[in-house]
Image: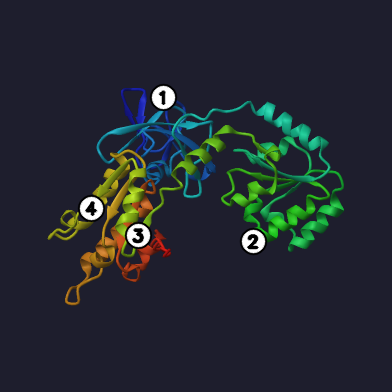
Amino acid sequence: MTLIDNDQFILTPACGPFSLCSATGEIRRNGKPEDEKVLAHTLPRCSKIDIVIDPSNISHAWIKKHLLGHIPPKNKFYIPTPRDSKIECYIVGNPTGVINCNTQINILTQPPITEDPEIVSSSLHQVLKDASDGFYMVTATDPEKVLKKFSGLIFRAQNLPSTLSDFYNRIRQESTTSTIWCLRPDTWGALSNVQALLRSASVHLPIVALFDILPRDKEWSTMCTPDKIFHLDREILQIKDQKEKLDNFYNRLYYGPERKKQRDQFLPTCAWVECIEIADIIHSAVGDSARAMQTFFEECAFSRPSPCALVLEDVDELLTPCEDGDSRWERDMIEELCRGIDSYPSVCVIFDATNPVLVPKSLLQRVHKIPPEAPAHHTGS
């Protein structure tokens, strides 16, 4: 971190050893040479952080790049942007440990509005106390804390019986009245098999599926009625709402004779549309074309309202090398496009092509192919 104005910090990418800050008592990277050093192997790892950022359209990859290797700051801090400015950030709650590649980083646009957990827990306590069977779904930012509050038999992915039938038999043998807690059952195996087992077991006992995030597959929410779903922390719902708003803005490839018409029907739903002209990305100097493409992604991610669409037309012709060329420019463009798509998930990339077969496979793997609209059939009178 870099100290500015005596009480504000800019978080820069981690380097150097950990040290104990004499001013605040926090353990930090990028500290002063005179601070007391702390051995890295003595520090725990951080499993999850929720970070509030203003403005919120900065890319997830950029945030992660600056957070990795640091311990979450306790107070408000700043992250620099590529445009020589800075954005205000702070961490929700009090997470501890070193942020690493396995840390779950949730980006929020405003502080989470938390409901009194004791009220929700009391309601859940009463429901499970009176229940003799049924399937329930619970989400909580700290599942282990929930498990300590409730009694029952706990199953985790690492201590499951060898087969699902053994799991069912163990439930029947070891518990006749207890609640069965299943931690992250969406990671146990094939969705249909796991759900069939839990649905069958819930006929005889109350089964609770406990998640630390909303499960990716909506089938879990449809397994029970709304009155059997409990969200113990409001921030989980907030993350869900933000994700659903952006779910429609995925990367797309339009193809076929009506591709531009289909594309133009979608673009007005975006807050900003940035179109790449051929002259903008063809340069004689080596590397300039790739840098120009990177600049387009950065502009869309940091300087444009979200969701922002980045449009590149006729990619099948543009990225197909000439017969007498060395194809270096095309390879550089494909590589930079893939890097931009992976690094800036907030940018909605829109391609169109006459023949999708000619579009490079590495790009096809990163976009959704939008099929041509079926022609209208007119019947004679």
- Between the residue at mark 1 and the residue at mark 3, the CA separation in whole angstroms equals 56 Å
**Disc 4 or 2, which lies upstream in sequence?**
2
Q: Residue at x 51, y 38 (%)?
A: 241
For mark 1, does the 10 Å Cα neighbourhood hold few (<14), some (14 to 19), or many (20 or more) residues?
few
Q: Residue at x 70, y 42 (%)?
A: 225
Label of residue 23 in the image? 1
Q: Nearer the viewer, residue 306 or 96?
A: 306
User: On the image, numbered disc 3 is attached to which residue?
Assistant: 254
Label 4 residue SS = loop
Label 1 residue SS = loop
Q: Three-letter amino acid code at disc 4?
A: Ile
Q: Three-letter amino acid code at disc 2?
A: Ala
Q: Three-letter amino acid code at disc 1?
A: Ala
Residue 350 in view, yes or no = no
* 327 sits left or right of 30 in the view: left
Q: Residue at x 28, y 53 (%)?
A: 311
Label 2 residue SS = loop
User: On the image, numbered disc 4 is attached to which residue?
Assistant: 276
Residue 307 against residue 380 in the figure, above or below: above
- Between the residue at mark 4 and the residue at mark 2, the CA separation in whole angstroms equals 43 Å
**Disc 3 or 4, which lies upstream in sequence?**
3
Q: Position of residue 218 (x, y in %)?
A: 59, 50
User: On the image, numbered disc 2 is attached to which residue?
Assistant: 190
